[in-house]
Amino acid sequence: MRLLIVDDSSVIRSRIARIAQHPDLSPIEVVGLARHGEEAIGMCSRHRPDVVTMDLTMPNMDGLACIQGIVKISGMARILVVSALSDKRTALKALTYGAHGYIHKPFTDAELVAGLQELVKD
Amino acid sequence: MMQALQESDLRAFVESVSHFFEHSSGDGADVRSAYLAEPDQELPHYDYTGIVDVSGGWRGALYFSAPGGLLSHLLLIAGAHQYGEEDHLDLVGEIANTFSGRARRELGEALEISVPRRCRGVSIRTSSASRPYVIPLTWRGYAAQVVVDLHSER
């Protein structure tokens, strides 16, 4: 499974990359670490990830716009939003735009593992 | 008409702070009673400060200021075994963002939040528009504080 991690925080990007190697998950290759939506769109075109973890509050292009862009260029990618934005309307918007799952920050290792498992189980 | 943040609104931020430490580390922070600071005043700060600017139905900013030791401790819990100044700055901004984002659970989309700014050793000067709330906290022996400097145009 090919994973693209999108988050403006380097601490969060590193943490997600580490958790992605959890033994309960199928083998994951991290194909890109993007700091914002624009960078993510470019990486998505080049690397064609199967799964994307997506922050929402980012510079240049935010996560909601990025989700719409990724759906256009790589409709098969499954997107897991990992965001601090905890209101229901934002979560609903993200899912409507094409995200497949949503977990809130702060998250535990177990929550992210479960979120990734849920995303790829079909 | 400008309205100051009410105590009921403040609860959303206090809950965010408590939830963050409990959920990140399994150890709740000792969140002490918030107090009102004076407007246009310099507040005490710690080594690093994350700032989230707020727009929409609310105006102002949220600050989270913490010592390097607290941030190092959280980085270790998050599995980072090598870290430096950039990681402290990154994390302090991320925490300010997380506090603000979770407060939207109660305050809704009207709390539009910016990408965080991150500073080292910069003093917090409150706006002249309203009296901000200061929320002091202690986590694993480290003191830190959140400043909620918001007003609404309701």
Image (tube, coloured by chain):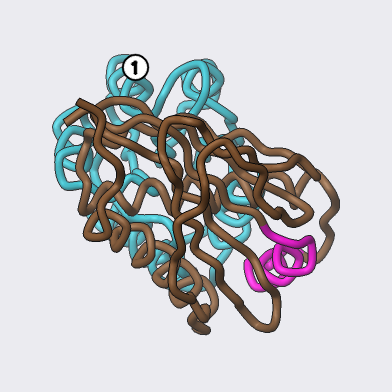
Q: Secondary structure at mark 1?
A: helix
Color of chain A here? cyan
Magenta span contains residue B78: yes
Query: Compared to B77, does B146 lie above or below?
Result: above
| Percent coordinates x, y for residue B96 in the rendering | 52, 49
Residue B112, placed above or below residue A81: above
Q: Which chain is brown?
A: B
Please identify the quarter of the rendering in which residue A114 is found: bottom left
Q: Is residue A29 visible?
A: no
Instruction: Please state if A90 lies on the left or on the right of B125 as rendered.
Output: left
Per the image, the residue denoted by label 1 is A69
Q: Residue at x 58, y 50 (%)?
A: A12
Please provide percent x and percent y for residue A94. 23, 35
User: What percent of the width, then of the height, locates residue B119?
Assistant: 73, 39
Magenta stretch contains residue B143: no
- Name which residue lies at 60% across and 77% down: B138
Q: Residues within 10 Å of mark 1 (few under 14, many from 20)?
A: some
Magenta segment = B66-80
